[in-house]
Amino acid sequence: RGQLGFVVRHINSSTWWHEHLSEENVEFLKKITAEEYKAQTASKLCPLKDEPWPLNKWTPDSIRVGVVAVKLGMMPIWTKSGEKHAVTLLKVQDCHVLRYVSKEESGGKTAKLLVGGKNVSPFSKPESAHEIFKEAGVPRKQKVTTFNVTDDAIIKPGTPLYAAHFRPGQFVDVTAKTIGKGFQGVMKRWGFKGQPASHGQTKTHRRPGAISTNKAAKVYRGKKMPGKMGNIYRTSFGLKVWRINTKHDIIYVNGSVPGHTNCLVKVRDSKLPTYKDCNKNPPFPTFFADGDEELPEDLFDEDIFQFTDPSVTFA
Amino acid sequence: MAAACGRLVPRGAGIALPGRCFSLSGYRVSSGGKPPKFQPPPKPVIMDRKTRKEESRFLSPEFIPPRGRTDPLKYYIERKDMIQRRKVFNIPEFYVGSVLAVTTANPYASDKSNRFVGICIQRGGKGLGATFVLRNVIEDQGVEMCYELYSPRVQAIEVLKLEKRLDENLMYLRDALPEYSTFDVNMKPVPRQDHEEIPVNKVQVRMKPKPWSKRWERPKYNIKGIKFELPEHKMQAAQKWSQPWLEFDMLREYDTSKIEEKIRKELSEELGK
């Protein structure tokens, strides 16, 4: 029907990166990249010595960077009064700041900082994709996100970010892609009630029923119907940070977080107005490992029951 | 006597020949010119009590990580917390079928603590959230309490009687006659030596008349501890639900021997057992 355009025929055979290389060359490339990655991470370990950008003081209006973490799993923790809460473990793995985009460049209201997550092999992507990482002098990352940041919180590209960027007792928002459920019907996707199982229903048990009224004479945009469910970005707001492990860079965050285990999540200071007072005096603009502060291996919130204490008794 | 029969007697030690009860190992008198090659007697293997105990050391089931795609780092972090708790609070070795007494802290009780005695019917959960369910019949009412092993409200866990049963899960005691689930609340702990093997109680439990909460005669539960008084044709009809191919399914195999070894080593280093 209509005009018949030429159908573009694509060449669907793509080679993988080591298809036309000899085994020795493949081994050599792998070895070289591993060494290069090690050298790059080692060179970025002392950000305070490499002419860092000016460090400012925290004000209640400043918004600082967040962090990209890997969701490890969930665990129970107990408070000092014996109540149980479930926490999610988020590991901050090879998190580096990649690029600074100023307010004028981006055209938005605030400056932006691009941050990258877990290290990943550079071979499956074209060279054009490696530009950002080469500029920052950092290995290729699996996830790159933007954080809107005030001008006093900007950080030099290449600085590593750690779990100690957050402190126990503060509140965070966690964004991630939800688990994909595929094409789902209206009962699972939108929670419709469906129809009864018996009493004369003919072939109608999980259907949406009526989709509009008679007078409207159309179906409104955004009508809830079956479709692909999941695999979209969602945020959980106002999650309390219970504990930070500085040795393995793990954040213990209250409740559940969208996404499957081992997925990459974006963690940010909460922007809910109820928690504005709880996030006072954080490490600003970020926590520097080669700075003066010596942190213990585990930082706990005051209410948490630590396993070094004896069992809880009510006096 | 030895000289006369030296050539004919075999060399093995302790072979009872008629009329002779002494061994003639390596003690042959030769008739030829060359002396025989000296064969030292076989070394006796001393089975020490300690070595036997190390081989069959008990590893609590909540330490073994389940099969999945999670990072082993997560289990390592959890185990560190579990070990820390065990250093402060003693969690004894017990199995499903042992009788335990648990004291927990309770803000609403007059003594601020609760004591419950019961038989362990199930151990579930992995890691810090591991639980066990104790069952007892108090004043003709069956009561089951589920406790978390690592909860800070648990003040003491004593094993009153350490024994195993034929099954890993004793949920069928709910449908058994109440005498099998009653235990005296003021029971004294049964004394037991350290090096004795854990006794297996092979009791065959008698059930209340059907209907039961679950069809325990079906092969999926694989229960060995019930004395089924059902007619033969019902037992055979239950076999219709058997899945004999399951034991050969290779995808379901989960070999935990290497993981267990590593965890045992880690535990013994930390807890100094």
Image: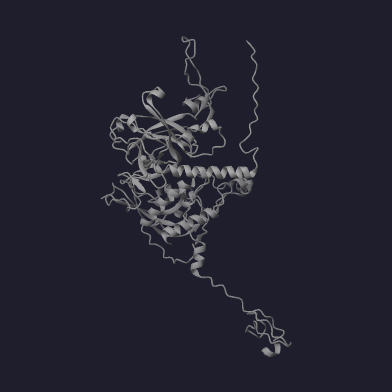
Which quadrant would the C terminus of chain B be assigned to in this image?
bottom left
Considering every residue shown, the one lying at the far left of the view is A315
Give whichever of B211, B17 is nearer the camera: B17
Query: Does residue B130 appear to the left or right of A274 in the view shown?
Result: right
Expressed as whole percent of the image width and height from the top left, the position of residue B32 reads 74, 87
Which residue is found at the position 41% from the left and 63% from the top?
A: B190
Considering every residue shown, the one lying at the far front of the view is A51
Which quadrant would the N terminus of chain B be assigned to in this image?
bottom right
Give whichever of A202, A264 is nearer the camera: A264
Give whichever of B48, B72 is nearer the camera: B72
Q: How is the image coloured?
A: one colour
- Above or below for A34 versus B86: above
Considering every residue shown, the one lying at the far right of the view is B32
Q: Tally the numbered discs.
A: 0
Query: Does residue B255 appear to the left or right of A175 in the view shown?
Result: right
Which residue is found at the position 48% from the left and 21% from the top?
A: A224
- Above or below for A267 versus B95: above
